[in-house]
Every structure is written in structure tokens, then in C-alpha cells.
Image: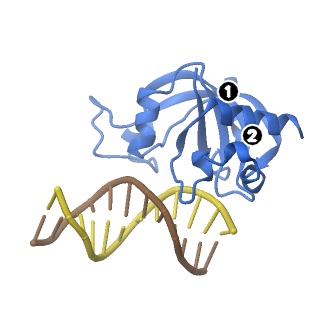
Chain colours: A blue, B brown, C yellow
Amino acid sequence: MAYWLFKSEPNCFSFTDLVAAPDRTTGWDGVRNFQARNFLRDQVRRGDLVLFYHSNADPPAIAGVAEVVQEAHPDPTAFDPGEQHYDPKSDPANPTWVQVSIRAVRAIDPPLGLPQLRGIAALSGMELLRKGSRLSIQPVTAAEWDAVMGLAKSQ
DNA sequence: GCCAACGTTGGC
DNA sequence: GCCAACGTTGGC
């Protein structure tokens, strides 16, 4: 079992939206970065746990925990010209882009803001906190996970 | 709104 | 294959 961090702009899709979704589940579509895609395709497994991160928020924050309920399968939004993330170069017979499905486990309330996370020594090496970090699907170490859960529990 | 960091594109 | 130009991400 592995740990991950998925980014989403809450204006687009928030943790609250995930909780409100049917079966508290959604397909994590729209990933259009190869490194992130490779994680989804090759390493994210059913049962893995996910930190749901709100980017472009005030403050940016970890807002909840989710679990992976379905492993990589084709991202249908890549084939729909009406979709924002439509990719005409993706061949339906050999899809370029995949999604996984995740289900909300529990909210972290109040969310753990970025400044707060930066104050935790155990998270100093976390990819999220690296200057210029843009990866939208990030691996999280067990030690980082434990530190984040400890912080959530202490508040 | 600014801008640093990063990924992609395309000319050569 | 190099790299400049460009577009995007995302914190501030």
C-alpha cells in the first residue's frame, strides 16, 4: 500500500465536491502531464491512500483523505472535443491519458495550510513543499503521511 | 497581478 | 539533439 498527494483547484473540484459525489467517488480525469500520468498508470494501486490538496486556494491546503478504488483506466475526457482537456493526439485504441477513481475517506477540518506544513520538520523533504513543485500526482512517504496525520489529529 | 519554475513545441 | 520561445502552474 502506498501514499499519494493529488492536487486539485477547489474552484474546479474540491474535497467537498468529492464528498458530495455519488458514492463519494470520482474519476480523477484531466491529468495531462506525463510524469503524473506514469504514476497513475504504473504505481497507483487500489487501496492506496491519497492526500487531497487544494492548490490555488487561500491558503493552499490539504483538505481531506481519499482512497483509490479503481486503478488506471482510459480518461474519457481526452476524447471529447467539448472537454477542456481534450487531446486530439490521443488514440482511443491506445489512450495516452488515464484516470484512477478515488473515494472520500474523511475531511481534514480545518485543512492543513501550506504555511503550517512548512513548519513541520518531518515534512522538509516533501515534494509538495519544494520550490517550484508543480507535479499534480506526487508520491508521499510513510513518514510524511504519519507526520501529516499526526498534525491533523493534534488540532 | 507578478513572476519563478517547469514542461512542451518547433526551428535548425 | 539542442535550445529559444512559449504556455502553464501555482505560491505569493
Left of C9 or right of it: where is A142? right
* Residue A20 visible somewhere in the drawing: no
The chain that hosts pointer 1 is A
Among all residues in the image, which is located at the extreme right?
A155
Residue placed most toward the observer, A154 or B1: A154
The chain that hosts pointer 2 is A
Up-down: is A101 above or below A96? above
Q: Of helix, strand and loop, which one carries label 2?
A: helix
Locate residue A38, reporting x and y percent: 40, 35
Up-down: is A49 above or below A64? above
Q: Which residue is mark 1?
A: A22
Q: Residue at x 52, y 53 (%)?
A: A134
Up-down: is A50 above or below A31? above
Q: Residue at x 60, y 38 (%)?
A: A5
Up-down: is A47 above or below A95? above
Q: Quadrant of the C terminus of chain A?
A: top right
Tags 2 and 1 both on a single chain: yes
Q: Residue at x 70, y 57 (%)?
A: A57
State the count of labels: 2
> The disc labelled 2 sits on which kind of residue?
Thr
> The disc labelled 1 sits on which kind of residue?
Pro
Circle nearer the N terminus (2, 1): 2
Left of A26 or right of it: where is A73? left
Q: Which mark is residue A83?
A: none
Q: Of helix, strand and loop, which one carries label 1?
A: helix
Locate residue A133, reporting x and y percent: 54, 54
Q: Residues within 10 Å of mark 1 (few under 14, many from 20)?
A: few
Q: Which residue is mark 2?
A: A16
